[in-house]
Image: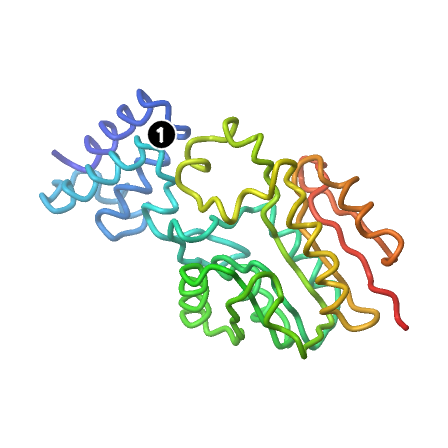
Amino acid sequence: MNLQTALLQGQELLSAGGIPAPRLTAEVLLAHAIGCQRSWLYAHSDEELKELWWIHYGRYLHQRLQRMPTQYITGTQEFFGRDFRVTPDVLIPRPETEHLIEAALQYSVSSILDIGTGSGAIAVTLALETEARVTATDISSAALKVARGNARRLAALVDFVRCDLGASLQDHTFDLLVSNPPYIAETDRATLQKEVRDHEPALALFAGADGLAVYARLIPEAARLLKPGGRLILELGLGSLDPVRKMLDPSWCDIEVIPDLAQVPRVLSATLPSL
C-alpha cells in the first residue's frame, strides 16, 4: 500500500465515523505516524507504507474514531504561532484565547499572574512576548508538569506554583492578572462534543451548575492579588458577560469587553482602582 492509498482509506474510515474534516485529519495522523510534515506526504505519495508506519497510523485512526481529539493523539497544538505540548491532563488551547493575549499585550507591565495555567500556553506566550516576570498557578500537579515542560522547551521564564487560584501567593501583588477559567455549566455537560466531554479534563471545563462558580471566587482573589491600578483580563464563557460584569461592580473601573471573530463577547478586562 502506498501513502496515497493509505490516506484515501483513512479518509473513508473517518468520514464513515462522522469525524469532521476527514481528509485533513487523515493527513495529520499519517504524518504523525511517519514523523514528517504533511507536505512530505504529497511529495512521496507513491512511496510504500512501511509496516511500522501502518501500525501507528492504524492506532491513531482508531483513537480518533473513539473521539479522542487529534491534538491529544499528536501531542501538540499551535497557539499564537508556537507549538505547545498537550496531554489529556490539560485543556487544548483554543484560537479564541489568543484574544486574551492580544488584550494583555496592550499593557506595559513588569509582573503578570496567570491563574489556572493548564498547558501554560498563556503564561509562556506572555513571557516570550513581553519583558514582564510571569507567575502561573494551577491546582493540578499533572497540568503543571505539562506547563513546565512547555516553558522549558520554548525557553520561557515562568514561575509555576501549585495552588487553588492564588491561595499560595500571600505576599505577592501583580500589575496584570489573566485567566481562562473553567466556565461551562454542569447542566451543559450532555450537550458537549464527545471530544470535549469525554477527553478534556473536567477540572478545566466545569464551574458549578451555572458555569459562574470560578468567576465568583476569582474576582475577589484578583482584587487581593493586583496592585492598585492593576488590570484583570478574563476569558468569558458563552452568556457569562452580564453576570461576570455584575461581579465587578462597584469595585472595578475601566471595564472593556472584546468580542471574538464571531462577535461573541470573549474577553473582559477591568482595572482595580488606585488607592
Mark 1 belongs to which amino acid? Pro
Q: Residue at x 60, y 61 (%)?
A: 165
Quadrant of the snapshot with the N terminus: top left
For disc 1, the neighbor class at 10 Å (few under 14, some 14 to 19, many from 20) is many
Left or right: where does residue 22 sit relative to residue 189? Answer: left
Quadrant of the snapshot with the C terminus: bottom right
Q: Residue at x 65, y 36 (%)?
A: 210
Secondary element at image label 1: helix
Measured as percent of width and height from the top left, residue 221 is found at: 71, 62
On the image, which quarter does residue 273 sit in?
A: bottom right
What is the count of numbered marks?
1
Left or right: where does residue 122 sit relative to residue 103? Answer: left
Q: Residue at x 27, y 52 (%)?
A: 36
Tell which of 44 and 148 is nearer to you: 148
Q: Is residue 37 above or below residue 206?
A: below
Q: Residue at x 75, y 47 (%)?
A: 258
Mark 1 lies on residue? 22
Q: Is residue 116 above or below residue 15?
A: below
Left or right: where does residue 228 sit relative to residue 209? Answer: right
Measured as percent of width and height from the top left, residue 238 is found at: 67, 36
Left or right: where does residue 104 sit relative to residue 230? Answer: left
Tell which of 221 and 135 is nearer to you: 221
